[in-house]
Amino acid sequence: MFARRGKLLVMQGGGPTPVLNATLFGVLDEANRVAQFDSLLGAQFGMEGLVRRDWIDLSSISPSELRRIRMTPGATLGSTRYKPTPDDFRQIIDRLRRDDIHSLLLIGGNGSLRGGYAIAQAARDLGFDLSVIGIPKTIDNDIPSTDRCPGYGSAARYVAQSVRDLGMDVSALPQPVSIFETMGRGVGWLAAASVLARFGDDSAPHLIYLPEQPFELPRFLTALDRVVKRLGHAIVVVSEGINKADGKPVFETGDVTQRDALNRALPGGVGGYLADVVTRELHIRCRCEKPGLCGRASMLHLSAQDLADAELVGRMGVRGIVQGLRDQAVSLLPLSETGSKEDGCGFVPLSMMAGERKLPPSWITDEEVGVSEAFIQYARPIVGELLPYARPLATIANSGLKRGNP
């Protein structure tokens, strides 16, 4: 008979994803299955909830409601981008000590996982016995020491399918240029995923621009002009965080009201900026498509692998607590190295989740499409198959339907 392990507290932090709640489902279902906890608690609104001692009892959620949580986007516990102060960390430990909570699971991105490591350090400094396990999530796919991040596969699927759809629309009634702007801040994982939309040499996207390489406006205009002259139209994908050679953003809003909770300028807008430049410099019509938050909220674009990953990391977080691990984070292993879902995870020190993981240089090319076959092989099984479309009949050689044929 296993000994009871007291109370388990879980929180969600940072930007939501389509599968963030699937991870919470994995945590709660696994905790109920092993039945080793006196109670299950959830901190509302992430780090702020930890500081304020704003947590709720999750022990009595019905099985049917738990299943609905699994397939619900957003963050059902509420989230935040709050950055704790040193006093906040001391207060968090005081709150946990007062309620006799010695097990903490943090589901979050770069900032939340850094916060989790700081909480673990504060617990050691203050002599409090606390097991902290980090569980990665982010659509940006930029957390180090894990093969992929739950949330990325579904958001990348949204990008790839949307770019494929956009390409079919623009090629049917040629709108000279359409610029599709992806999220991702300083990394290009989402923008790169748009390459999966291609199903022929002339299909969208025709140009892809990532933050990992300096953006050169004259070179962009030359490449775009070349594509438009060849095809009559072009689909360009740009990441919101592309930078110039000096490291400065190609576009950043100067509006002081457009800043997030960490006082960072809200990303986005580069697509609209470039559309204006294209219109002015090339004298052709250009529009911008910026799905924004839709890409991290769409359940219709759910990736099956992403959903499985999200649930698995939640379950593994609970298993880490049961095993007595401390200051660790769940890490997904490459799909090629795993024989089954159950052995697809491991643990790494929580400190190794700090920093930002960019696309490997070997996965980036100087060609117009911008990403290599190695990236495609990595991303395709994570994203899954897209809807297959027929090529426009007017482009099929020897079809007998080409313009001018009787």
Image (cartoon, helix red, strand yellow):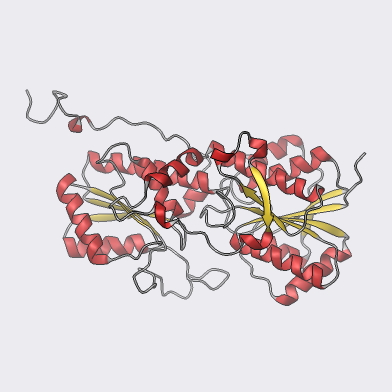
At 59% from the left and 46% from the top, the residue drawn is 73
At 86% from the left and 70% from the top, the residue drawn is 127
Residue 313 in picture, x, y percent from top left:
66, 46
Q: How many marks?
A: 0
At 88% from the left and 60% from the top, the residue drawn is 100
Occupied quadrant, residue 109: bottom right
Q: Is residue 186 above or below residue 205?
A: below
Occupied quadrant, residue 254: bottom left
At 19% from the left and 59% from the top, the residue drawn is 222
**Side of 55 where 251 appears, left or right:** left
Residue 80 visible from this viewpoint: no
**Is 157 or 367 nearer to us in this picture?**
367
Residue 183 in picture, x, y percent from top left:
45, 56
**Side of 181 where 34 appears, left or right:** right
| Quadrant of the frame with the N terminus | top right
Residue 92 visible from this viewpoint: yes
Occupied quadrant, residue 211: bottom left
**Side of 178 where 24 appears, left or right:** right
**Is 348 or 52 nearer to us in this picture?**
348
**Is 83 or 57 nearer to us in this picture?**
83
**Side of 361 where 60 appears, left or right:** right
Residue 315 in picture, x, y percent from top left:
71, 43
| Quadrant of the frame with the C terminus | top left
Residue 112 in picture, x, y percent from top left:
64, 62
